[in-house]
Amino acid sequence: MSGSENHRPIRRRTFVIGTAATAGSAALAGPLAAPAAAAAFGYTDDGSNYVVDTGANLVFKVSKSTGDLTSLSYRGTEYQGYGGMNSHIESGLGSSTVTITQSGSTILISVTHGTLKHYYAARSGENNVYLWTNKADTSVSATRYIVRVKAGLFLNDEPDSYTYTNSTIEASDVFAKSDGQTRSKHYSKLRVIDYNYIGWTTGSVGLWIVRSNHEKASGGPFYRSLLRHQSADGGGLYEILYYGQNQTEEQRFGLQGPYVIAFTDGGAPSSSLFPGTLTTSWADSLGISGYVAASGRGRVAGVGITGRNTAHPYTVGLANSAAQYWGSARSSDGYFSITGVLPGTYTLTVHKSELAVYSTQVTVSAGGTTTLNSIAIPSSNDPGNAGAIWRINDWSGTPSGFKNADLMTYAHPSDVRAAAWTGNVVIGSGSETSAFPCYIWKDVNSGLLVYFKLTAAQAAAAHTLRIGVTTAYANGRPQVVVNDTWTSAIPSPPTQPSTRSLTNGSYRGNNYTFTYSVPASAWLTDTSQYNVLKINVVSGSGTTSYLSAGTSIDAVDLLA
């Protein structure tokens, strides 16, 4: 990359986010650039920084006073920094104790700030920086690492970028372009389970963060968080472990990593760096605080899962207060294997898509494999198995299939591409699901009407109405009215994250099912007429419009 290219956007192959589904094939596109010899490998001290030369094409600097990454030079071009800020944990740790050691082909920089310890490692001949973070308590507010990248080196005008205008439409981090499309660093589209790496490429240079296994993160495999941003000032790549945004779990503490800053010749990072694939036996003897080698970990394997709805993917998660892991169940028989697990007792949860349908306890020992017999999901555990007079959407723990559902993972509800949030639903029309909005807000589309007919026998009996939700904002929850003659009680709000969710790309909260016992007297006796169900959102909190109380819908059904 010539010096003149440093000051204008490069508009070729602007970015890539690597998904778990395509990780193997993507890695073949661009192996790591590493020379045959690495004679220059080593480090120097320039007075303010430790300067590490990997002996490949990468030279980086770490501040001796703060532990910030102050320079990231690849093939002679400086990539680090914008707005006078460095790359670092959080917004920078400030005064820290920083030391460096070299052991053969590995250099380790150790940063201590109070109870937090952070590490950078370099390997001879590699264009990678390996990072670990050991957070022991809440003295550092959250857990993220941000790689700050100079403006003009990469172009990103995708959903997870800032727009280059002053049109802020929510808080200080959601923007609208002149064409009505919305942009925000929150709009990554992806759950943790969906990606292995994030970054940008020009076609000749790629800069990536390869995520860790997130064993000390919170939120599980379906958590969504900001991953990347870019504006006129520069770009940022993130490893988010605890952000406090729409979190469903308490924060976990301990050593997390490695996650990797990787440069390539323009292609994707090598799959050998991906979580679950990366081998770091070279780090076993480095003295990293909290480090547990492969020999000190175990494995959980299940021979199969019965009682599945094969139209949905199944994921098996392990979680306790100290760690979390997950693995995909094989579509043919439900076989799963979860490796690299710290010893301990875990709650094992089977998810149909994102809906928990089974749980049990398992114990993992170092060096051992906990083998489980075939797991049988009881039919009653899956609400989709219940007999229904009618059902809108399948129960999956997600709003997938509803109107605007896919768009809401990478756009604001006000985005010009969103279909109208209002409109009624007619059972038997064939478009019930696509006509039903994925989100309902008190100030936007509360009072949604669902029309349906009942037979004489059905109208003569009481029935249970169910509404499944995936999260809620400001305690928004549904209250229902049938035929303007029967009104349900206002249900108590379930526990949900208190931060924004519906407007910043995430429907993930705590799945909950509201049930309403509708008496036979509420139904119309004329079977030729449509019964009318009105769904209101009630709450005493929230503000206005899309920040009024709201909820995300999973499924709605009337049981037989």
Image: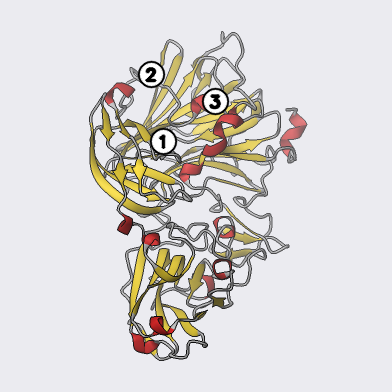
Compute the Cα span from label 3 to label 1.
24 Å
- x%, y% of residue 507? 47, 59
Compared across the picture, whether 164 is left or right of 479 comes to right
Q: Position of residue 494 (x, y in %)?
A: 32, 67
Tell me: 30 left or right of 352: right
Q: Which residue is mark 3?
A: 60
Please tell me the numbered disc located at residue 416.
Answer: none
Residue that label 1 marks:
213
| Picture colour scheme | secondary structure
In the rendered structure, find residue 281 and report the number of the disc placed on it. Answer: 2
Give the crowd class for mark 2: few <14, some 14-19, many >=20 residues within 10 Å: few
Q: Is residue 294 above or below residue 17?
A: above
Mark 1 crowdedness (10 Å alpha carbons): few <14, some 14-19, many ≥20: many
Q: Dots 2 and 1: beta carbons under 8 Å?
A: no
What quarter of the picture does the C terminus occupy?
Answer: bottom left
Marks 3, 1: nearer the viewer: 1
Q: Amino acid at mark 1?
A: Asn
Tell me residue 69's x, y (percent).
50, 32
